[in-house]
Image (spheres, helix red, strand yellow):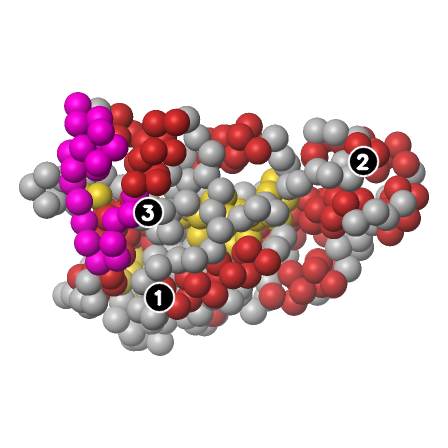
């Protein structure tokens, strides 16, 4: 129940079919074994027969099937209605400080905003705003803006306050950041749940499921590998990623063409390079993958490297299965692995089968 609204709040949202709570929590109906969005238009069950889940993964692992009416695994790629104008405001005026009192004037409970941003961006609303300001500041500095203009233009009252915040975020003072890069993070909806995408100036370096347990470790690895700060935002690579993912899930794209950046140990990069050579719609075993990199006895090490892949779906670790053809492990959950393989084989997903 971590980060969930109160039971009373969820009950009220469910009873009123409040679509703004879609993605914030999910409803499991014990009597049918189905789970739904809060806005589902199906007949409402008795409150005693429902339970609440943080995310799709929890509901599926509890034995529930996705509702065929509201289809909780399918999303339109848009944030909830109450969040969208807030994100727009931040993007249009990242230098503006938005206080809790401002949120209340917008009709938004600060606690609700905190929960939503923690869930989808891995940081509180206020931390998101600070990181967004710093990302804009770094971009301005790289483009040659004067430090005085950057300080005043991003809402800081003093140079010392700005320098301290900047150095804390990027690990270097603003005066030494003309050639600095950062990793921008964006949240992308998909039929297999929300994804966190990351990209720097060279290409996409992260695509992960937001509920994966290793997310914090992935962020730590990214900071270490790239010596870069991670801030919310978008760049051309993120925009291209969104477009290609949309076509992939629609069954229109069989080969991703966007640039990827995936530094690792020589062994890891050898494994990840080989994963990119597995054709769309096909699978190979871990043993075969080990043979293809000329390390036939390193099956376990290959499996470990497979699990450390930071760019899910695009570097297709889901196409590696056990020798007997069974799915084996997958960091995003076996249900997602099955969904992706079904998609690539042109088969209807078994997730929706009764």
Q: CA distance from mark 2 to mark 1?
A: 41 Å
Q: Which mark is residue 27?
A: none
- Please state, as top left, top right, bottom left or bottom right, where the N terminus lies in the image: top left
Q: Which residue is mark 3?
A: 276
* Residue found 44% across the figure and 52% down from its top: 195
| Residue named by callout 2 | 174
Q: CA distance from mark 3 to mark 2?
A: 38 Å
- Along the viewing direction, whichever of 78 and 163 lies nearer the viewer: 163
| Secondary structure type for disc 3 | loop
* Pick the front one: 88 or 143: 143
User: x and y percent of residue 152 in the render?
Assistant: 90, 48
Q: Secondary structure at mark 1?
A: loop
Q: CA distance from mark 1 to mark 3?
A: 15 Å
Image quarter (top left, top right, bottom left or bottom right) of the C terminus: bottom left
Residue range in magenta is 275-297
Considering every residue shown, the one lying at the far top of the view is: 297
Mark 3 Cα-neighbour bin, 10 Å: few <14, some 14–19, many ≥20: some
Q: Is residue 300 above or below residue 177?
A: above
SS of the residue at dot 2?
A: helix
In the rendering, at what x and y percent does residue 257 appear?
43, 57
Res 21 seen here: no
Residue, x 90% and y 48% (percent of image)?
149
Q: On residue 253, which mark appears?
A: 1
Circle nearer the N terminus (1, 3): 1
Residue 350, percent from left and from top: 17, 61
Q: Nearer the viewer, residue 88 or 229?
A: 229
Q: Is residue 155 toward the left or the right of residue 282 in the image?
A: right
Mark 3 or 2: in front is: 3
């Amino acid at each position: 129940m971590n980060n969930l609204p109160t039971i009373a709040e969820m009950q009220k949202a469910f009873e009123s079919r409040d679509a703004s709570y879609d993605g914030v929590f999910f409803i499991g109906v014990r009597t049918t074994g189905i789970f739904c969005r809060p806005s589902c238009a199906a007949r409402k069950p008795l409150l005693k027969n429902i339970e609440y889940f943080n995310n799709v993964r929890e509901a599926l692992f509890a034995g529930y099937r996705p509702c065929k009416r509201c289809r909780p695994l399918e999303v339109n790629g848009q944030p909830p209605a109450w969040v969208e104008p807030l994100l727009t405001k931040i993007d249009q005026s990242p230098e503006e400080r938005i206080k809790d009192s401002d949120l209340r004037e917008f009709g938004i409970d600060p606690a609700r905003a905190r929960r939503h941003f923690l869930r989808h961006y891995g940081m509180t609303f206020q931390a998101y705003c600070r990181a967004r300001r710093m990302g804009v500041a770094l971009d301005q500095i790289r483009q040659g803006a004067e430090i005085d203009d950057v300080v005043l233009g991003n809402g800081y009252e003093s140079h010392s306050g700005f320098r301290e915040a900047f150095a804390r975020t990027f690990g270097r003072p603003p005066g030494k950041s003309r050639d600095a890069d950062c990793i921008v993070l964006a949240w992308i909806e998909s039929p297999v749940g929300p994804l966190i995408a990351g990209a720097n100036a060279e290409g996409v370096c992260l695509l992960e499921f937001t509920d994966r347990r290793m997310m914090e470790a992935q962020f730590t690895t990214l900071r270490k590998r790239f010596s870069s700060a991670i801030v919310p935002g978008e760049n051309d690579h993120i925009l291209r990623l969104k477009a290609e993912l949309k076509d992939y899930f629609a069954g229109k794209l069989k080969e991703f063409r966007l640039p990827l950046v995936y530094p690792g140990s020589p062994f890891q990069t050898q494994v990840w390079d080989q994963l990119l050579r597995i054709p769309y719609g096909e699978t190979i075993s871990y043993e075969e993958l080990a043979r293809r990199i000329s390390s036939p006895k390193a099956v376990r090490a290959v499996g470990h490297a497979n699990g450390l892949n930071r760019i899910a779906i695009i570097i297709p670790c889901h196409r590696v299965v056990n020798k007997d053809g069974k799915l084996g492990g997958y960091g995003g959950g076996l249900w997602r692995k099955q969904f992706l393989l079904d998609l690539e084989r042109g088969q209807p997903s078994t997730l929706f089968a009764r």
